[in-house]
Image (cartoon, grey):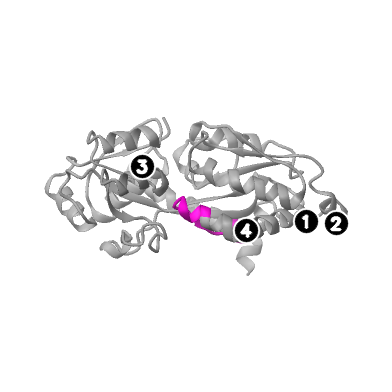
Amino acid sequence: MKVIATVGIALGLCAVTPPVIAQTYPAKAVRVVIPFPPGGAADTLIRPLTVKLADALGQQFVADARPGANGNIAAEIVARAPADGYTLLFGNSSLPISVSLYDKLSFDVTKDFTPVSMVAMTPSVLVVHPSLPIRNIKELIALAKKQPNKLNYASGGVGNTMHLAAALLDTMAGIQMTHVPYKGAGPAIVDVIAGQCDMVFVNIAPVLGHIRAGKAVPIAVTSKTRSSVLPEVPTVAESGMPGYESSTWYGFLGPAGMPREIVMKLNAAIVTAVGGKDLRERYIALGAEPETSTPDAFAATIRNDIPAWAKVVKAAGAKAE
């Protein structure tokens, strides 16, 4: 309890304001800044949630996509915004990854934000082209050891979660595969389906149709437990790599110093919305696992992720382009 309380204070959760402010909040539309382009995982998760929050709190929650720099453009916008609860970030695991990926950031991940709540965890699925003679992790590792650097994997760019999921497998398995970065997940998936690249670690939703059509073969999912959408596909951990996990969290953060009462009002609304049957079912259909949290628990997750991802970034030799 003592450690969590310390983390909460360090991440700006100690501000106090008269309860009347929380009672009148929100009195106008709330801007939700999204770090990635429309149509991606963040966009598909946040759109139905903004509708639920608007219904619950009586004001619009307006999604504002500001992609670029691995999410850092959007993060800087929110870090510099007034801490009044009217500008929020719908961020993901790229935030703690950026600490080690970039030599210098214009914000401090642990000091310039107020965590509000996690929303969902999205595991990736490792899919290979059907022509590749691999149907499980053990076969992949065996082939990679036999032919170092011959197998290649696509990603949406250097240092993103697609890249680091593969780099983590490289490190843990003691293998060497060749990284082929693309400008986004879409082109990476297209080339794997076309057979131009061997494999890709990617969110489940964009490849689910290809899997069902037999154009991509699922090898394993990267979460601790199996996916609700692909229950027949084992995890990497249970496939012979115990301890492996590479899921992406999504959640709400505001600028540092947000009033505690507003944070808790938002948290309660998010927890209720995500816990509703219709939104839960929609998220699961998208390959995401609904998962909310207290502000303090979310703060601890972010803080713990920084050194965990730093090890993977270092092992991969990844640096922002």
Identified at 66% across, 63% down, the residue is 5
Cβ atoms under marks 4 and 2 closer than 8 Å: no
Identified at 73% across, 53% down, the residue is 56
Q: Amino acid at mark 4?
A: Val
Residue 303 can be seen in this image: no
Mark 4 vs mark 3, CA separation in Å: 29 Å
In the picture, the disc for residue 114 is: none
Cβ atoms under marks 2 and 1 closer than 8 Å: yes
Q: Earlier in the sequence, mark 2 or mark 1?
A: 2
Q: Quadrant of the N terminus?
A: bottom right
Residue 9 horizontal/vertical position (percent): 68, 56
**Residue range of the region highlighted in magenta in the rendering:** 282-299
Reading the image, the residue beneath label 3 is: 163
Residue 204 horizontal/vertical position (percent): 39, 49
Nearer the observer, 301 or 39 = 39
Q: Earlier in the sequence, mark 4 or mark 3?
A: 4
Cβ atoms under marks 2 and 3 closer than 8 Å: no
Reading the image, the residue beneath label 4 is: 7
Q: Earlier in the sequence, mark 4 or mark 2?
A: 4
Q: Residues within 10 Å of mark 2 (few under 14, many from 20)?
A: few
Identified at 17% across, 55% down, the residue is 139
Cβ atoms under marks 1 and 3 closer than 8 Å: no
Mark 4 vs mark 2, CA separation in Å: 23 Å
Residue 55 horizontal/vertical position (percent): 72, 50
For label 4, the SS is helix
Nearer the observer, 82 or 102 = 82
Q: Quadrant of the C terminus?
A: top left
Reading the image, the residue beneath label 1 is: 261
For label 2, the SS is helix
Nearer the observer, 225 or 81 = 225
Reading the image, the residue beneath label 2 is: 19
Mark 1 vs mark 4, CA separation in Å: 18 Å
